[in-house]
Amino acid sequence: MHETLQAKAYRIIKARLISGEDPQGARISDFALSRQLGISRAPIREAMNRLISERLLVQKAGLGVFVPKPTREEIENLYEVREWLELGALEVVVPGLPVEAISEMQKSCDAIRLMADELEQTGTCLERGKSFARLGEADSTFHLTIMRSTQNSLLLELIQGNRVLEQVWDFGVRIYSADVLHRICDEHIGILEAIKREDLDASRAALREHIRLGRDITLRRFAEESEEALPVS
C-alpha cells in the first residue's frame, strides 16, 4: 500500500518525538523539516496539525509549534488514566487470557531479559534514542497484548495514545542499566505469573505497583529537572 507524503511525515516526526531526537521545549519548524525530509511543507503542516490534535506537539500563538513540556499534574493524570485502563482490562481478560496472548507476553519478557544480559556482558547501558526501540517494542508488546485481548478497539486506541504521550513526555530514566531492565522484566513476570494462575487480585496488585513505580520515577526526574531549571540567585 502506497504511503502518502502526509503519512510519511507524520510517521517520521512522531518517531523523532518518541526517540527524544526532538527534546521537550524544542521548536518544530515545518520549513526545516521540509528541507531535512525532502517533503513539501503542506503535508508536513498536515502531519504537525495531527500531532497537535494528539497532544504530541503544542501550538503557541505567535511563536510556533513546540514539543510540549508537561506539568506535574499532567504527568499524574496520564499515569492515573493508564492505571484505570490497564487494571480495567485485567477485569475482562482474567481469567481466560488466551494461550497465544500469554505466549506473546512471555516472549516480550524474554526479549527484555536478553537485552539486560547483553548489557551485563558488554558493561554498557541503553541510552534513550534509536537504540531504545527494542525496549520500547518489547515493553509495549507486553502491555498492549492485555489490551488487545479485551477485543475492545476503543480501549486499545486509548491506551496506545496514552503510551505514546508517556514516551514523549518522559522525564524518567534516560539511561537504562542492566539492573533496570532486569527489574522491569521481573515486574512483568510477576504480573504474568499471576495472570497464569488466574489470580485477578494478585495480577491487579502487581500491575498497579509496576505502573506506580514508573510514575514515581518520572515525577522524581521531573522535580529534579525543574530544580535544575531554576535561576541561580
Image (tube, grey):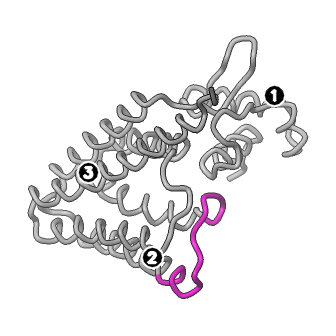
Residue 155, placed above or below residue 149: above
Residue at left offset 82%, top offset 38%: 33
In this picture, residue 8 sits left or right of residue 172: right
CA separation in Å, label 3 and label 1: 38 Å
Residue 130, placed above or below residue 27: below
Residue at left offset 51%, top offset 45%: 170
Which kind of residue does numbered mark 2 sit on? Ala
Q: Quadrant of the C terminus?
A: top right
Which residue appears farthest toward the top when viewing the image? 62
Q: Nearer the viewer, residue 224 or 210?
A: 224
Q: Which residue is mark 1?
A: 42
Which kind of residue does numbered mark 1 sit on? Ala
Which residue appears farthest toward the front when viewing the image? 233
Q: Which residue is mark 3?
A: 150
Residue at left offset 37%, top offset 51%: 214
**Of label 3 and label 2, which has the lower sequence position?**
2
Residue 115, placed above or below residue 180: below
Residue 181: % across, % down: 43, 70
Could one spot residue 50 in this view of the protein?
no
Which kind of residue does numbered mark 3 sit on? Thr
**Disc 3, SS:** loop
**Of label 3 and label 1, which has the lower sequence position?**
1
Q: Which residue is mark 2?
A: 111
In this picture, residue 208 sits left or right of residue 125: left
Residue at left offset 90%, top offset 40%: 35
The reply to whether the magenta stretch includes residue 122 is yes
Q: Which residues, given as a range, are shown in magenta?
A: 117-131
Q: Nearer the viewer, residue 50 or 32?
A: 32
